[in-house]
Image (tube, rainbow, N blue to C red):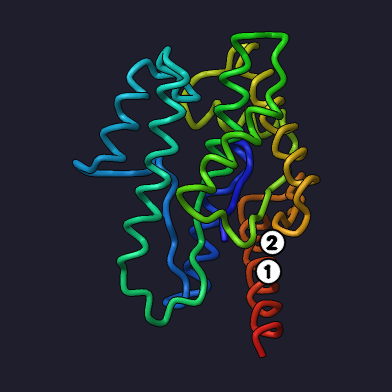
Amino acid sequence: MSIEGINGVGKTSAARAAAVALGARCLLLDELTDSAGNTLPAQVIAALGQENDPFLRAGHPVVETLALLALQVRKAERLAVQDLTGVEVILEDRGVDSIAVYQAAILCAQDPGASPEPVLRHLLSSGRRWRPLPDATLLLLGDTAVCALRFADRIGHPLATADLRLLEQIDALYRTIAAADPGRYVLVEVTGLSREQTAAAVQETVAALLDRRAAHAS
């Protein structure tokens, strides 16, 4: 199960709160950008973030896309050899969907005539070859302008006009893929909610999905 949404929507704090509420039966996989220490993911993210770009754009979008997809595959490979005894749900803070959505928007920003949707579908299809997609994906939907302000506050400076447009396009792409795959995506509307209310909404949704899964298994 993964949690998705644009920057500033409250995704990471909600994922962490849900994991705490679920306790030992939940394994939380942190977002790649939260990788710490002298690890390969942390080194790659640090390299991509050297220009202090809010979307990890280092000037080579194709290479950046492949590197981020590879890190997602590596995450799945490392998970496959872990002892998951007692774990009922794996909660991933951003997964392959994030890479596909964000990088499709970034790749196509260089060509105003290009449509990001085919690129998005191609990236998802490519990722699926190497690691399974989540059985359920919670997509947090918020007010883009409010999310942009929260994101700007987190990075310490306002977003440029072009970056605001990119964030709006990313939000639209998330909504497009969710509409195309309603069996996997669960929409969680968090517009106007506080951080605590957003976390509570995510916890309730995760609990409902687990109950539904248990009912189908019985």
Residue 118, percent across and down?
Answer: 69, 29
Looking at the rendered structure, the kind of residue marked 2 is Ala
Give the image quarter of residue 185.
bottom right
User: Residue 109 has which mark?
Assistant: none
174 relative to 152, above or below? below
Residue 50, percent across and down?
Answer: 32, 19
User: Residue 201 has which mark?
Assistant: 2
Residue 194, percent across and down?
Answer: 67, 50
User: Quick one: quadrant of the C terminus?
Assistant: bottom right
Which residue is nearer to you in this view: 207 or 82? Answer: 82
Instruction: Name the outermost residue toward the left.
Output: 38
Q: Residue at x 67, y 80 (%)?
A: 211
Q: Where does label 1 land, which residue?
A: 204
Q: How many numbered discs sit on the rendered protein?
A: 2
Give the side of residue 90 with respect to residue 192, left or right.
Answer: left
**Disc 1 from disc 2: Cα separation:** 5 Å
Give the side of residue 106 with respect to residue 30, left or right.
Answer: right
106 relative to 92, above or below? above
Q: Residue at x 59, y 37 (%)?
A: 8
User: Quick one: quadrant of the N terminus?
Assistant: bottom right
